Image: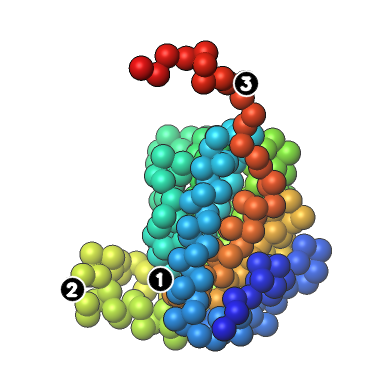
């Protein structure tokens, strides 16, 4: 069985900038591109190896950075993506940032202050587990900020990401789209399976009660912030394996598209003493 081409995965998953997006049109259990789970797992391993090699090249060139934004409801698999897609990538070339509730110091600054500080430098793959989009998702749904303030943030975020993209940072944004029923199963696993109990947070059930509001907020986020310089990819996440395989294909393709080459250094072996 052949693997879907990278461009085929991109086109199926992207929320095309400038076009109206409806979250209900995307199947969280979509298996079209990876009908065979074993094959998806095999392709993931191949792409993870390629990502490792491409990250070495990215690090050697120090010309660009890659920022991977992972956003999704609880149990959608943000940490699972990091663990699997980047399983073969050297930690020396990665920077992972998990965004929690802001601290007092962070609240004393504008909401993007802590985000800009975490953006990866050139040569590094940076990964955001949650992100600045919390400020138009949970902040919006739970009324942590006035509606007019949230409304301003869509354009502010777009301009922030444009600034990054114009200064050497390629941005990949993945919405991990999990179904309501599947989330319920995974939350229950966190109670019934001993090795997962440490993950359980009763507060997650409060967010679950607000599911329709969160889905509306996600749909608005994608519509307002899928741009030519930082489009959103909506990834079916009911299947962990297929989710990881799709993201790995896109990450690999994005690194390949940078067309980086090894630095050409003027070095001659005879100029050095290797004895």
The answer to whether the residues at label 1 and label 3 have Cβ atoms under 8 Å apart is: no
From the image, tell me which residue sits under label 2. 194
Compared across the picture, whether 84 is left or right of 72 comes to left
Question: In the picture shown, does residue 210 fall above or below 121?
Answer: below
What is the secondary structure assignment of the residue under circle 2? helix
List the residue tagged with mark 3: 266
Residue neighbourhood size for the residue with mark 1, other residues' Cα within 10 Å, grouped as few (<14), some (14–19), many (≥20): many
Residue 86 appears in view: yes
SS for callout 1: loop
Q: Which mark is residue 191?
A: none
N-terminal label among 1 and 3:
1
Can you give x and y, in whole percent of width and height, for residue 220 in the image?
Answer: 67, 66
Residue 175 visible (yes or no): no
In the displayed structure, 268 sits above or below 152; it is above
What residue would you read off at disc 1?
75
**Residue drawn at the location 22% of the way across and 77% of the way down:** 193
Front of the two marks 1 and 3: 3
98 w.r.t. 269: above or below: below
Residue under the image location 42 percent in, 14 percent down: 273
Q: Is residue 113 left or right of residue 194?
A: right
Number of callouts: 3
**Cβ atoms under marks 3 and 2 closer than 8 Å:** no
Residue visible at 34% across and 76% down? 187
The tag earlier along the polypeptide, 3 or 2, is: 2
* The N terminus, quarter of image: bottom right
Task: Please give the name of the residue rendered at 67% of the width and 82% of the height, measured from the top-left corner.
Answer: 25
Marks 2 and 1: in contact by CB < 8 Å? no
In this rendering, the label closer to the viewer, 3 or 2: 3
Q: Secondary structure at mark 3?
A: loop
Q: CA distance from mark 3 to mark 2?
A: 57 Å
- Indicate the quadrant where residue 236 lies: bottom right
């Amino acid at each position: 069985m052949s693997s879907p081409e990278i461009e085929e995965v991109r086109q199926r998953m992207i929320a095309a900038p400038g076009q109206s997006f409806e979250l209900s049109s995307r199947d969280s259990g979509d298996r079209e591109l990876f009908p065979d789970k074993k094959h998806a797992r095999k392709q993931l391993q191949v792409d993870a190896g390629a990502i490792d090699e491409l990250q070495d090249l990215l690090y050697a060139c120090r010309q660009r950075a890659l920022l991977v934004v992972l956003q999704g409801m609880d149990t959608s698999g943000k940490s699972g993506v990091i663990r699997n897609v980047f399983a073969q990538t050297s930690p020396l070339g990665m920077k992972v940032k998990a965004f929690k509730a802001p601290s007092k110091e962070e609240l004393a600054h504008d909401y993007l202050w802590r985000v800009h500080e975490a953006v990866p430098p050139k040569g590094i793959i940076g990964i955001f587990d949650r992100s600045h989009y919390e400020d138009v998702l949970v902040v919006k749904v739970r009324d942590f900020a006035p509606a007019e303030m949230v409304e301003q943030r869509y354009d502010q975020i777009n301009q922030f990401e444009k600034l990054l993209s114009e200064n050497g940072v390629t941005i990949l944004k993945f919405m991990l789209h999990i179904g309501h029923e599947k989330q319920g199963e995974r939350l229950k696993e966190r109670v019934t399976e001993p090795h997962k109990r440490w993950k359980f947070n009763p507060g997650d059930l409060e967010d679950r009660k607000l599911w329709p509001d969160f889905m509306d907020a996600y749909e608005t986020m994608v519509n307002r912030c899928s741009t030519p310089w930082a489009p959103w990819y909506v990834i079916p996440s009911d299947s962990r394996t297929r989710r990881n395989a799709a993201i790995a294909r896109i990450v690999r393709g994005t690194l390949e598209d940078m067309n980086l080459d090894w630095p050409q250094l003027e070095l001659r072996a005879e100029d050095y003493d290797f004895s």
